[in-house]
Image: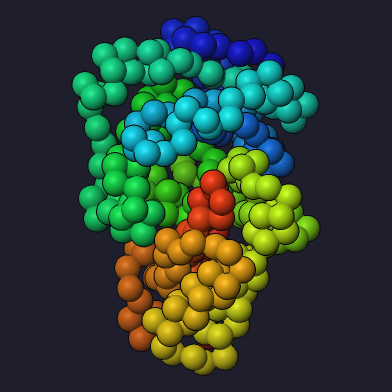
Amino acid sequence: MKTFHTIAELRTALKSERLQDKRIAFVPTMGNLHEGHMDLVRRARQEGDVVVASIFVNPMQFSANEDLERYPRTLTEDQALLESNTCDYLFAPSALEMYPDGKRSQTQIEVTGLSDILCGATRPGHFVGVATVVTKLFNIVMPDCAIFGNKDFQQLKVIEDMARDLSSNVEVIGVNIARADSGLAMSSRNGYLSAEELSIAPTIYQTLLWAKQSILEGHVSYANICEQALQKLEAVGFERDYFEIRAQHDLLTPSEKEKQLVILVAAYLGKARLIDNITVELP
């Protein structure tokens, strides 16, 4: 695996691959990689002839009170993990390489509406940062397809809409959530959890399963289900952010006739803000 830190170096390397008519599959990450990321890399290997990963802790998607400075940076370990999973190229740029004029002078991409709800409501500007950096990465790598995890369901929808609205030639592919044996969704932020908090954290997935079962059993008051779910989480030590039942295709409040639902949750446990989701297909 070759690692590049500049846009020019990566473009030169990928140009030769593209001239051989090879299909390029791309996995953008913020590093501190785990088995969930490797699922994405393995899917990329299935989808493309050449696998490119990126590691960039994007300052544009962190607000002033968030964990940008303490977000774990483990490049050496990440390189070894990617190489052992047959990644071909790693792009690991600096903030200066990505934002040479500073992030405040950076042209911004916003997917209106979808960026302001759920996680966007409590993290203002977050999805503008996500859409902007992914657009830049798509323009740098010029992949045929890009692989994202379904754990951040809203982020995936933002990127899908951004790619469609900007007539991008990149196929956006979502991959199922990787979970520990306890059911806890794998996340770099799980590293913030203490041993006691790690024993509590799987409650978030158990609560999603309970809510899904409630819907399938015919309970139609989604507001009541969501409030009960939040109370279940608070009872074991979580601090609520949101627990919502939405339509899968646009993340809006579903109509009574909506059959494809997604249940989304964000909650704080100690220093960690955990997110998760589960889909529901009604008969």
Compared with 263, 24 (above or below) is above
Looking at the image, residue 123 sits to the left or right of residue 268; the answer is left
Quadrant in which the N terminus is drawn: top right
Residue 190 lies, in percent from the top left, at: 63, 46
User: Which residue is located at x 59 percent, y 20 percent?
Assistant: 90
Looking at the image, residue 246 sits to the left or right of residue 206; the answer is left
User: Which residue is located at x 51 percent, y 37 percent?
Assistant: 146
Which quadrant holds residue 61? top left
**Which of these two is toward me, 206 or 53?**
206
Residue 182 lies, in percent from the top left, at: 75, 60
User: Which residue is located at x 67 percent, y 25 percent?
Assistant: 78
Query: Which residue lies most toward the bottom here?
Result: 218
How many marks on residues? 0
Residue 32 in view (yes/no): yes
Compared with 195, 33 (above or below) is above
Residue 142 lies, in percent from the top left, at: 44, 25
Residue 281 in view (yes/no): no
Residue 123 lies, in percent from the top left, at: 34, 48
Compared with 3, 154 (above or below) is below
